[in-house]
Image (cartoon, helix red, strand yellow):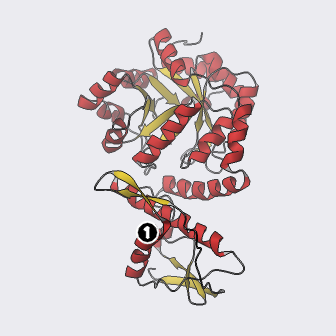
Amino acid sequence: MEGLASFRAVASLSSRPRNPISASAFDARGAKWLSLPSSSFSIVRAQQMESKGTPLSAVAVEGEEEPEKVELKIKEWEVGMYHNEVAASQGIRIRRRPPTGPPQHYVGPFEFRLQNEGNTPRNILEEIIWHKDTEVAQLKQRQPLYSLKKDLDNAPPVRDFVGALRAAHSRTGLPGLIAEVKKASPSRGVLRENFDPVEIAQAHEKGGAACLSVLADEKYFQGSYENMVAIRNAGVKCPLLCKEFIIEAWQIYYARTKGADAILLIAAVLPDLDIKYMTRICKMLGMATLVEVHDEREMDRVLGIEGVELIGINNRNLETFEVDTSNTKKLLEGERGELIRQRDIIVVGESGLFTPDDIAYVQEAGVKAVLVGESIVKQNDPQKGIAELFGKDISL
């Protein structure tokens, strides 16, 4: 379907904003970010557009919208598209947004958007990220970053997520448990119909969980940030991981205002500089960062980032959703495992953990914590489910 386009008439724009917006670009050869003026950044993108047959003069804006606002929208889209290019250079296959989506292109009096297979997500993770990109943009409009920073003063104190995992491992001799408070998932559907987040969180804590992972995504996991608020307000003492698809720093501040003690960063989605930047923000806020990897290349990238204390190895292929627990052992063999031990990084095993044998397998590979959802959330008695998972009672 390459080449299809939809058209409608729009008003013309005779001039562009006089005050350029600053931008940054990634120099792949020098492996560093360069600060570029808006004009330079636009020239790069404009040259790419011209090479594809879109003349520079063919720019117009719809209706009465101010030129400055249109320029900002286009600038944000250009940065997003450049983000895809940087990510691809690091082996990241998940695109931040559709390559032929908004903002629309303008040719003379006509507006058009190319329609082709590029507008279709390649897998469920990419679909989630595309939706999250739109969702976060809307949330930021309603509650800008400066207002979130004000709300930080009223946020509950940060609790030591990493310390809780180390203490649990030391106390039981088993991997510290991060128990999930999760109602549903795209691959399994609804896991628990009678879902009471506070009741489940309290049961996990009584069962010996060191920390809790609270799903925040609403559309795909039926989660909520308000679940996190309710759990903290109920007096649950376990540190909380905000299980969300983080793509912007704004989400970190928002999670902190809701009581999160840690966040998840997915290496399959975020370029290295994003992970570095977000990790520093978390340290500034006193939060922990769990960086999730799925393969050797992602593990090598994350090990090249200073300050990483928690690495999660997801045994689930996020593109196919197939699970293979041997992935954990593979990623912890040889030099990688030695480097992790030298840096005293806590490795968290994720996905495919249902029995004491599964726990023993990943622990032998070098895991000191596990993140478990389905195998205990589906139990009528989560406390009993935790004991069955570990083959013993690990409660205090």
Who is closer to the viewer here, 296 or 261? 261
- Residue appearing at x 34%, y 34% in the figure: 326
Reply above or below: 239 against 191. Answer: above
Q: Position of residue 197 (x, y in %)?
A: 70, 32
Who is closer to the viewer here, 179 or 48? 48
- Residue appearing at x 64%, y 35% in the figure: 256
Image side of residue 296 versus residue 246, left or right: left
Amino acid on which disc 1 is placed: Ser
Q: Position of residue 223 (x, y in %)?
A: 66, 42
On the image, numbered disc 1 is attached to which residue? 40
Reply above or below: 240 against 387. Answer: below
Reply above or below: 222 against 106. Answer: above
Image side of residue 330 versus residue 183, left or right: left
Q: From the image, which quarter does the C terminus lie in? A: top right
Q: Is residue 196 visible?
A: no
Classify mark 1: residues with Cα within 10 Å, few (<14), some (14-19) or many (20+): some
Q: Is residue 169 visible?
A: yes
- Label 1 sits on a secondary structure element that is helix
Who is closer to the viewer here, 90 or 201? 90
- Residue at the limit of the structure toward the front, as seen here: 18
- Residue at the limit of the structure toward the left, as seen here: 334
Q: Position of residue 64 (x, y in %)?
A: 72, 79
How many numbered discs?
1
- Residue appearing at x 63%, y 71% in the figure: 68
Quadrant of the rendered structure where residue 262 is? Answer: top right
Reply above or below: 211 against 392. Answer: below
Who is closer to the viewer here, 32 or 217? 32
